[in-house]
Amino acid sequence: MRRKIRSIRNNSTIYFMGIVFLFYLFLAYNTPLTGDDWTWGTDRGLLRLENKFEDYNGRYVSNILEIILTRFDLIRYFFLAAFSTLLVYTIGKLTSCNHHKISYLLSFIFILLVPSNIFAQTFGWTAGFVNYVPSLALLLIYLILTKNIFNDAKPVYKKWLPLVIVPLGIVTQLIVEHVTLFAVFTAFFVIFYTFYKHKTFYSVHISYLLATIIGAFIMFSNSAYLSVFSGTDSYRTIKDSTTGSSNLLQRIYNTYSDNMYQYLFLENPVINIFISLMVIFLITKAVSKNQWTNYLLKPLLLVPIISFLIYLIAINPLVSDDFFYSKTNDLEALLSITYFISIVFSISFFIKEVKYKTRLLYYICGVVLLTAPFIFVTPYGPRGALASFIFLILIGLELFSYNSRHFNFEKGLLTKPLLITAIVLIVFYTTIFFSNGLVNRDRLNNLDAEVQKEKNTIYVRELPFPEFLWMSSTKRKHFIKMFKRYYEVPESTEVIFVPYPDKKPVNN
C-alpha cells in the first residue's frame, strides 16, 4: 500500500513538472532576444570568446552559453524551459514538506509572483537568465544531495558521487559572482555542520569544497576583477573605501536604505506576507510555561512583524513614494530591518526541531550573504535580488513544512486553491507572452521586408508588455547598433522604436 501511494505521488509530481516544463517552453518560445543578447549574438560575442573573456568577466560557463543560445533558437527554448523547471523542482524537493505536491505548487506560484522588474531581468532576458537561474538551480542540487546531514542517522552516499560532485561544484562557480562566493560558504557550512552533528568528514563534502575553491579561483583570476578593484572598470565599481566600523555600518545602511530593502521586501509582498503569516502562526501556537516568553518575548516579536505586514498590505499601496518626505526610505528601511530581525529571533526561539532551525538559519544567511557583496560592488539591480528572493521562498516553505508537521495544519486542504491560483497565473503569463511573441515575430518579419526594400528609416513596433522583458526596445545607441548588426540591418539605415499601439503609419 505504501509503495502504491508513493508511486501515485511520484507520478503526480512527474505530470506536474511536465506541465511546468511545457509552460516554460511556451514562455521561452515567446521571449525575444533583447539587450545584451543582440551583442552576444554578433561577432562581438565571438571576439570575447576568442579573447577568452579577458578583461570582461570570469563567468566562463554563462558567457559560452549565451553565445550558443543567441545562435540556436531551439536550444535556447529548451534550455530556458529546462532550468526554469529545475529551479521549481529543486525548491520543492529541498523543502521538507511530506506532501511534496504542495511544495512544488507553492514553489511554482511564488516564482511566478516575482516582481516584474526582477522577472524582466532574469526569466525575461536570456543574458540575465543564464547568469542568475542556472547558478541557483545547481547550488540547490548540492543542497538536495547533502540534505541528509540534518538527519539523526549518519549520511550515506554512493561511491561515485565524490567524482560527480567535482564538475557540479566547478560549473556552479563559473556563472555569477555572488553565487560563487555563497557556494564556498555553503561548502564550509556543510562540512562543519556534518562534523558537529555526526563527528565525521565525508569525501563528497570535501570534493565539493575543493571544486568550489578551484572554480572561484578560475573565475576571479580573470583580469576584469583587478580592474574593478583598481577602479578602472567603467561598469562595475567598488564603492569608496572607508576605514572604521562606524563608516562601514553607515555604508551598509546607506546601500540598504537606497533600494536594497525595496527589492527584498516591499516589492516582494506575496512571499513576505506568507512568511509573516507562517511566523505569526508559529509564535501564537507555540506553548510555553515561561511567563517572560508569553507576555514579553511573544509581543516583542509580533509587533514588528504585524506592523510591517500592515504597512505592506494597507499603507504602502495607498501612499506616495515620498509621503514621509526625505525620511520615507529611512522609515521603510527601519520597518523592514525590524521585521527581518524579528523573523530571525522567532525562528531561533520557537523552532524546536534542530534540523528545521538549522536549515532556516542557513536560508536566512543566504538572504543576507547573497545580497552582501552588492554593499561594496555596484551596480545592484533587480536581477541581483533574485537569489535572495529564492532563499526567501525557501524560508517560507520550510516554515510551512514545520507548522504543518507540528501543529496539525491540514495542508491537503490547500491543494485545490493553489491549483486554481497556478492556473490563473499560467493563463496570465500565457496571454502576456503570447502577445509579446506574436508582435515580436511580426515586427521582425516587417523589419526583414523593409531591409529588402532598402528603406532609409525603419520603424519597429515596441512590444505590448515590455515590463516583462529587459530592453526589448531601446533608444540607446549601442543597443540599436547591436540590434541592427544582429538582424543584418545596414548601418546606414535608421531604426526607430515606436510605442505600442501607436497609430502612426509605419514604414510608409
Image (cartoon, rainbow, N blue to C red):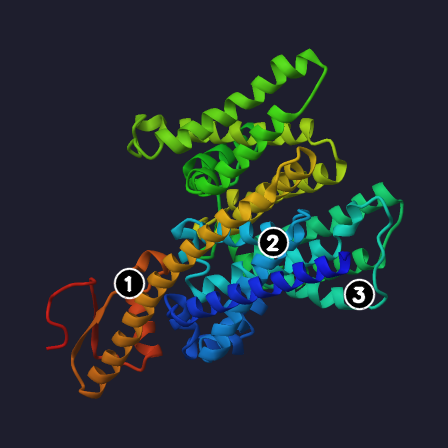
Q: What is the quadrant of residue 507 in the picture? A: bottom left
Amino acid type, residue under disc 3 in the picture? Leu
User: Of the residues tagged 3 and 1, which is closer to the observer?
Assistant: 3
x and y percent of residue 367 in the render? Answer: 58, 43
* Label located before the other in sequence (3 or 1): 3
| Foreground of the two, 12 or 468 | 12
Q: In the image, which disc is placed on residue 490?
A: none
The residue indicated by pointer 1 is 476
Give the residue displayed 56% in from the left and 73% down from the top.
52
Kindly report the distance in space between the C-alpha atoms of the residues bearing marks 3 and 1: 48 Å
402 is higher (above) or lower (below) than 498: above
Give the residue displayed 69% in from the left and 34% down from the top.
406
The residue indicated by pointer 2 is 101
Per the image, label 1 sits on a secondary structure element best described as loop
Amino acid type, residue under disc 2 in the picture? Lys
Per the image, label 3 sits on a secondary structure element best described as helix
Report the residue that reaches farthest toward the right: 199
Any part of residue 199 in sight: yes
Q: What is the quadrant of residue 281 in the picture? A: top right
Quadrant for the C terminus, please. Answer: bottom left
- Image side of residue 61 versus residue 385, left or right: right
User: Of the residues tagged 2 and 1, which is closer to the observer?
Assistant: 2
Kindly report the distance in space between the C-alpha atoms of the residues bearing marks 3 and 2: 28 Å
Dots 2, 1 in contact, CB < 8 A: no
17 is higher (above) or lower (below) than 324: below
| Foreground of the two, 151 or 491 | 151
